[in-house]
Amino acid sequence: MNLFFHTLFTGCSLFALGAYLAWRSAIREHTVKSFPRSKIAAIATMTIAAAWFLYRHILHLSEADFGEHKVLISIITLVLLVMPFKFLPDFLAVRGAAILVLFYSREALDAAFMQEPASRLFMVSIVYVGIAIALYLGAWPYRLRDFLNWLYVSSRRPRILGASMAAYGILLGAIAFGY
């Protein structure tokens, strides 16, 4: 767990997403608006989230933490990966992305825990914003569709949001090199 890496990765991710939103084109708007119900995005995000959970959390369980039940927990995880595609297929991409944000948030906050530089709080604050958004969208994923429809009513809104995200990403990148 490296504070430099997590701050830089968070900054680069914000910059990339912000630049993507700020660049106005009909193709990008259609791509962004189709994300919540995208089957390909759902498969990708849910599979990556399940693999992350299995690798990072299950494979390293000790005996005191139900380590003798690794196989059973892995099977349950795989069943829980497949079942939503049959019984709850709507907005799985949003739920998968929310899971990934929460998993990454844990790693980033662990990297920043008990570190000396006060500038780490720039990264920590945006991670907590991400946690709040992920929890909200994980519970009500259709709200992302509503937000995206609102966002693209005006051509200025995605540009302002994208430019703000990109600027904060650049700030985080600069802060990362200041550690």
Image: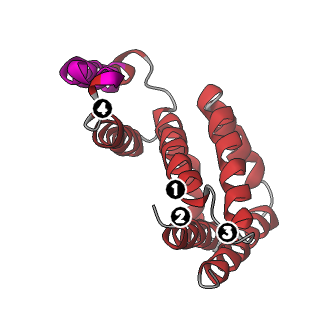
Q: Residue under label 4, please give it.
A: 61
Can you see residue 75?
A: no
- Nearest to viewer (mark 4 / mark 3): 3
Q: Classify mark 4: helix, strand or loop.
A: loop
Is 85 drawn above or below residue 120 in the view shown?
Answer: above
Mark 4 or mark 3: name the one nearer the start of the chain: 4
Q: Which residues are magenta?
A: 64-83
Q: CA–CA distance between discs 3 and 2? A: 44 Å
Q: Is residue 39 left or right of residue 62?
A: right
Tag 3: residue type? Glu
Work out which quarter of the rendered image holds the N terminus and state it: bottom left
Q: Residue at x 63, y 64 (%)?
A: 115
| Contact (Cβ within 8 Å) of mark 1 with mark 2 | yes
Give percent across and percent down for residue 23.
Answer: 63, 74
Q: Nearer the viewer, residue 61 or 149?
A: 61
Tag 2: residue type? Ile
Q: Classify mark 3: helix, strand or loop.
A: loop
Tag 4: residue type? Leu
Q: CA–CA distance between discs 3 and 1? A: 41 Å
- Nearest to viewer (mark 3 / mark 1): 3
Q: Residue under label 2, please give it.
A: 27
Mark 3 or mark 1: name the one nearer the start of the chain: 1
Mark 4 or mark 2: name the one nearer the start of the chain: 2
Residue 168 disc label: none
| Contact (Cβ within 8 Å) of mark 3 with mark 2 | no
| Contact (Cβ within 8 Å) of mark 4 with mark 2 | no
Q: Residue at x 55, y 64 (%)?
A: 28
In which image quadrant can residue 24 be found?
bottom right
